[in-house]
Structures are given as C-alpha cells and as structure tokens.
Image (cartoon, rainbow, N blue to C red):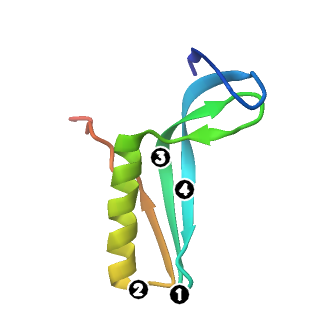
Amino acid sequence: MKKLKDRCPICQGYKVKATTTFTVDLDFGVVVVRHVPATVCEQCSTEWIDDQNAEKLEELIIQAKSKHSMVEISEFPYLEKKVS
C-alpha cells in the first residue's frame, strides 16, 4: 500500500489507498458491499470513500432495497475490468 501525503485529521497517521467493507442496515435486512475502494488511516483505521464511489454505493443500496432481501452481499463494481 502506498502512503499518501495527506495525514489523518484524527490521529495524524498516514493515509493509504485500500479497500473496505461497507454495510447498511435497512431495517428489513442488511446490505454488505465488499472491496470498496477507500482511503484508510494506517494508525486508527478511519476510512474515507470518495464521492464517485459513494454514488455507486448508493445505486447498489437502491437496487438492494427494491429486492427487499434480508441479506444482500455483493462485490463493489470496479470501473476497470481486467481483460484476460
């Protein structure tokens, strides 16, 4: 993981590019999205998700709400797909 120049405003640790797991409780069920790109503090583990990825998460949550499943687990849709 590459350390970024920005420091964590909470603990002054270094921020790194990483992934996180995002969860939402919808009262009738839970949505879990794995491998979401994020910036994470190495020291205190505070996480930040950029606006573009947050919009994609919102779309996934809206889709999950329409299914009304008790548990929905998905992978984050990456912008770039590896071609094999």
Residue 28 tag number: 1
Q: Nearer the viewer, residue 38 or 34?
A: 38
Classify mark 1: residues with Cα within 10 Å, few (<14), some (14-19) or many (20+).
Answer: few
Q: Specify the quadrant of the image occupied by residue 10.
A: top right
Q: In the rendered image of this protein, does residue 49 appear above or below residue 21?
A: above
Quote the CA–CA distance across marks 2 and 3.
Answer: 22 Å
Tell me the amino acid under the disc marked 3.
Answer: Val
Are circles 4 and 3 on residues that touch, CB within 8 Å?
yes
Quote the CA–CA distance across marks 2 and 1.
Answer: 7 Å
Tell me the amino acid under the disc marked 2.
Answer: His
Q: Residue at x 34, y 42 (%)?
A: 52
Mark 4 highlights which residue? 22
Q: Residue at x 25, y 39 (%)?
A: 81
- Residue at the far left in the pictured view: 83
Residue 68 tag number: 2
Q: Residue at x 43, y 62 (%)?
A: 74
- Residue at the far top in the pictured view: 5
Are circles 4 and 2 on residues that touch, CB within 8 Å?
no
Mark 3 highlights which residue? 36
SS type, badge 3:
strand
Q: Residue at x 40, y 67 (%)?
A: 61
Labels 3 and 1: the sequence-earlier one = 1
Labels 2 and 1: the sequence-earlier one = 1
Residue 7 pos. (x, y %): 66, 20
Quadrant location of the C terminus in the rendered image: top left
Tell me the amino acid under the disc marked 1.
Answer: Phe
Disc nearest the viewer among 3 and 1: 1
Are circles 2 and 1 on residues that touch, CB within 8 Å?
yes
Tell me the amino acid under the disc marked 4.
Answer: Phe
Labels 2 and 3: the sequence-earlier one = 3
